Image (cartoon, rainbow, N blue to C red):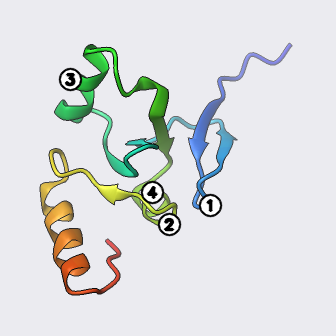
Amino acid sequence: MNTAKSYILTGADGRPEASPVRGAWGGNRAEKIYGRLDCPSALRAIARGGYVANRVFFADEATALAAGYRPCGVCCKDRYQAWKSARERGEPWTH
């Protein structure tokens, strides 16, 4: 019997994939936002009973970006500001 823990992470193509390793970043599929697993905004939404149906996880930040997600404005303020500035200039942003 296989007792190894498996996690479902979102890949760079946006599709779910099984992983033996827990995700390092969380995200919201509907809003296309990613952030830290301890993000205060996400934790408040989860406590209110929302967000969970759209919750996704990523192995790393590069994968979240490749899948088309943007940084959270609450827990990743510096990254979010850089993303927003690049978008306003019409430039691509990569961390």
Residue 56 position, x and y percent, is 48, 38
Q: Secondary structure at mark 4?
A: helix
Work out whether 70 lies above or below 83: above
Q: Earlier in the sequence, mark 2 or mark 3?
A: 3
Q: Earlier in the sequence, mark 2 or mark 1?
A: 1
Nearer to the camera, 7 or 86: 86
Q: Quadrant of residue 91?
A: bottom left
What residue would you read off at disc 1? 13
Q: In which quadrant is the N terminus drawn?
A: top right
At a point 52% along the width and 35% down the height, the residue shown is 22
At a point 57% along the width and 37% down the height, the residue shown is 21
Q: Are marks 2 and 1 in contact (CB under 8 Å)?
A: yes
Q: Quadrant of residue 40?
A: top left
Q: Secondary structure at mark 1?
A: loop
What kind of residue is marked 1? Answer: Asp
The crowding category of the residue bearing disc 4, from other C-alpha atoms within 10 Å (few below 14, some 14 to 19, many at least 20), is many
Query: Between marks 4 and 3, how big is the CA–CA gap?
Result: 21 Å
